[in-house]
Amino acid sequence: MKVLLATDCSQQAAAAAKFLRSLKFTEPMSLTIITALGDPYGSSPESTQHWFPELLRQERARAEVHQADMAKLLRERCTRIDTICRPGHPVKVVLGEAKDLDCDLIVIGARGHSFFGRLLIGSVSDSIATHAKCSVLVVRPPEEEDSQRDADASKANRILIGYDSSKASRDAVEELMALDWQADTEVELLSVAPIYDYLLGNGLSTAAIANEEEIFKEMKQGGDQMKDRLIKKLPKTQSVIIHDQRVGDAIADLADKSDSDLVVVGDSGHSLLDDFLLGSTTKYVLRHAPCSVWISRHHRTNPDPDTTAADAVSNGTSE
């Protein structure tokens, strides 16, 4: 298990390290801790050439101390820990290293708890989570004033999984279940059945109503089947299905109401045009969920020869 922990020496990065420590992977974890030091030479070489080398030296020294603290914190969980400090833009540095190392998971801290803070999650976290080829865990710890949860701030005791029976969502569950969770961990499998916008059509046709009901029935059956599998390992698993036009909204809202610690969504990918015009469900959840978000791309490295054409058409939670 190759994990890349990206840190900018902030409190959010420290919280991400603590969250990672709480996860118990069933296979040995090889960890790389990486810090991008910035590269102002690229934008204004003449104005920075005199003072940047000294700043770079100071930042490298600070990062190395911070990385050493993280390595000490995570030593018990890892078979190997490497550290990297490299000049350059954080997004390029992290994504480039993740590709070179063929990482399974990138872990990074997020900023912001308010509505606008979550919406503006931070260009670095957002870009890494959006463009990474592997799975990404964006850690957003509880607000500091939430004293009741301080003791559990670095753990995932309540997990919400966006599930639509697609390959992306099935593999997201499999990726999550590759970890050892405590038996009292609460898991909600949320399926969001679509609602037709009859205002854009010709009214409530019998065929449309029947099709909507059939989709709801199939999604409920899929959720119940996955629940029956998970409940053997995690007894506090339940399947929830709702009607909603806005899948991302439904996931973020339930995460808020359930006081979830972690939301898991499978990302099957979007075209550039779709992302530009609509924004994917995955990106919406990342920006609006009030807790940490695990974006699973496990299916991209876990080909399923039996996958049907229907799996290629996402119903929403795996966009």
Image: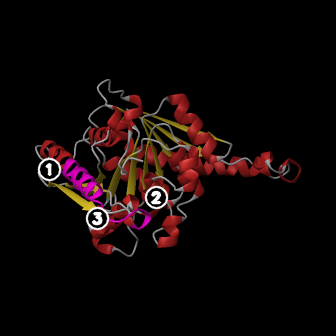
Q: Give the structural element (helix, strand or loop) at label 3.
A: helix
Q: Nearer the viewer, mark 3 or mark 2?
A: 2
Q: Give the structural element (helix, strand or loop) at label 1.
A: loop
Work out how far the residue at label 3 is from the one at label 2, CA to CA, in angstroms. 29 Å
Q: Residue furthest right?
A: 46
Q: Amino acid at mark 3?
A: Ala
Q: Residue furthest bottom?
A: 145
Instruction: Name which residue lies at 19% across and 51% down.
Output: 217
Q: Nearer the viewer, mark 2 or mark 1?
A: 2
Instruction: Name which residue lies at 45% across and 57% down.
Output: 286
Whether residue 93 is situated above or below residue 28 in the rendered picture: below
> Measured from the top left, where is residue 303 in percent x and y?
36, 27
> Measured from the top left, where is residue 96 in percent x and y?
59, 35
| Residue 242 in view here | yes
Residue on which disc 1 sits: 183
> Measured from the top left, where is residue 284 in percent x and y?
46, 58
Residue on which disc 3 sits: 151
Q: Give the structural element (helix, strand or loop) at label 2.
A: helix
Q: Amino acid at mark 1?
A: Ala
Q: Amino acid at mark 2?
A: Tyr
Which of the numbered marks, if any, corresponds to residue 284?
A: 2
Say which of 281 and 257 sits in front: 281
Say which of 189 and 159 sits in front: 189
Which of the numbered marks, if any, corresponds to residue 148?
A: none
User: How packed is label 1: few (under 14 Cα within 10 Å), some, or many (20 or more)?
Assistant: few
Say which of 299 and 9 sits in front: 299
Work out how far the residue at label 2 is from the one at label 1, CA to CA, in angstroms. 30 Å
Total labels: the figure holds: 3
Instruction: Classify residue 196 by image quadrant.
Output: bottom left
Callout 3 touching callout 2 (CB < 8 Å): no
Q: Which residues are magenta?
A: 199-220
